[in-house]
Image: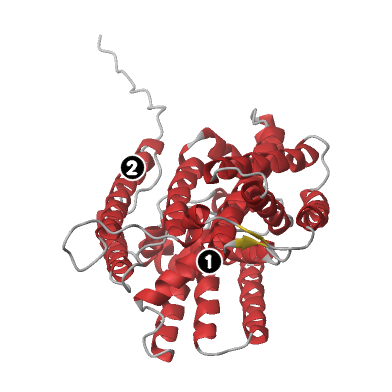
Amino acid sequence: MSTTTTPTPSATTPTPPTPEGFRFRDITKMMGGGQSTSRQFGILGSLVVIIIIFQIWTGGLTLSPGNLINVVSQYSYILILAIGMVMVIIMGHIDLSVGSVAAFVGIIVAQSMANWHFPWWAAILLGLALGALVGAWQGFWVAFVRVPAFIVTLAGMLFFRGANQWFGQSTSVAVPTDFQYIGAGYLPELPISVPFNFLTMVLALLAVVWVVVFEMFLRRSQRKAGTEVAPVWVSVVKVVVLSALILVAGWLFATGRPGTSFPISGVILLLLVIVYTFVTRNTVFGRHLYAVGGNRQAARLSGVKDRWTDFFVMMNMSVLASVAAMIYVARATASGPQDGNGWELDAIAAVFIGGAAVSGGIGTVIGSIIGGLVMAFLNNGMALLGFGADVVSMVKGLVLLLAVAVDVWNKQQGRPSLTGFITRRFSRSEEPFPTAAGSASGK
């Protein structure tokens, strides 16, 4: 008597296959995937268009080596603030105090060298420690007393602005030459007979290596997580385009006027971008950050300590504000009572333009840097063309309003972005894994 054995269905979830062939929506995956991918792809295209327009309009000045060096030197501190601000906004908070905190730290650091005779390295450590202390103070009120971050940081904006003027007696305090190097210095020249700055090109090559390795790890992590992996051609095009842009930019920085090269402030910015991109994408803290920002109650029920996440995000923001302050003071050669005015607005604008959602839970470090560069090249391009500060301010306000309006409108329409809408129209029949919303609507 024969028996028939019925095979037991496998309990494992099938790994989504890597899509083959060309699909229009795969283009947006060059930004790495995620909820804010399409917004970032669109804003990256906007950045390219802005640079091209100003390059033509200014007769080639925008992409000249000297101008690019000035852009990095002048706006690196705002981009550093944007790195911390995107984490705050992902959590659903806002920080209005970063400009005042930066001014407060700047005057203390300057006085520590001018009046207390601290060496430059001890002054830097003092600035970082002071930023951590200020951030812990504000984080305590936000995380454990549950005062809204808007109110806490509004109070901080007023308090630390007054503290800056009280400690500095509303005067400027100069900083020594050694300290100025972190804000006004460049990668040094080596005794090598080449017609460019050797260390700048080495840095560019290292950046290319990082892009390649990062893309390889991204694809491997996507396969391991069982999520859909972009076609190989997408990764190849992404790596080739980014590598070409990095090498061209490196060459422009390396061939500027004698005595200049890639700014030290830019090196600090690049290191922070790499570290915080890794932290937000590949660590437990990064996953908790998005979980709390997306749905605080669900994250809490899952065991996430949301209060400590709030605390460390607020403290981190003030530490980065102290870094930005020291870079700015070093470049300006002195700390003054007007330092930090409007910095928080520029940082918030960079984050929202770079794809972060007003309601929290969405945003990336890279997207915020792209948004900051959009603002930087708008400022720089209009300055090269002779526009006044009034016109520049109006244009920046309109750009910010448009970016947030697009985010709100697309949420009302039930889609992440206009680009996402277009790509779904081209590939709706190709979607292999329906969303939960789609499944529900199909019942």
Q: Nearer the viewer, residue 415 or 172?
A: 172
Colour logic: secondary structure
CA separation in Å, label 2 and label 1:
30 Å
Figure quadrant of the N terminus: top left
Residue 4 in the image: x percent, y percent?
29, 18
Q: Residue at x 37, y 78 (%)?
A: 63
Residue type pointed to by label 2: Phe
Residue 361 in the image: x percent, y percent?
62, 50
| 344 up-or-down from 15: above or below | below
Q: Residue at x 46, y 72 (%)?
A: 70
Q: Residue at x 29, y 66 (%)?
A: 254
Callout 1 secondary element: helix
Q: Is residue 347 visible?
A: yes
Residue type pointed to by label 1: Tyr
Mark linked to residue 75: 1
Residue 52 in the image: x percent, y percent?
40, 82
Residue 243 in the image: x percent, y percent?
28, 61
Question: Is residue 305 left or right of 141 when viewed as pictured?
Answer: left
Callout 2 secondary element: helix
Question: Is residue 430 left or right of 100 when viewed as pictured?
Answer: left
Place residue 194 in its image quadrant: bottom left
Give the residue number, with chain letter if any, for mark 2. 217
The disc, 2 or 1, on the residue closer to the chain's N-terminal end is 1
Question: Is residue 25 left or right of 382 when viewed as pictured?
Answer: left
Q: Residue at x 30, y 64 (%)?
A: 250
Number of other residues with Cα within 10 Å of mark 2, as a class: few under 14, some 14 to 19, many 20 or more: few
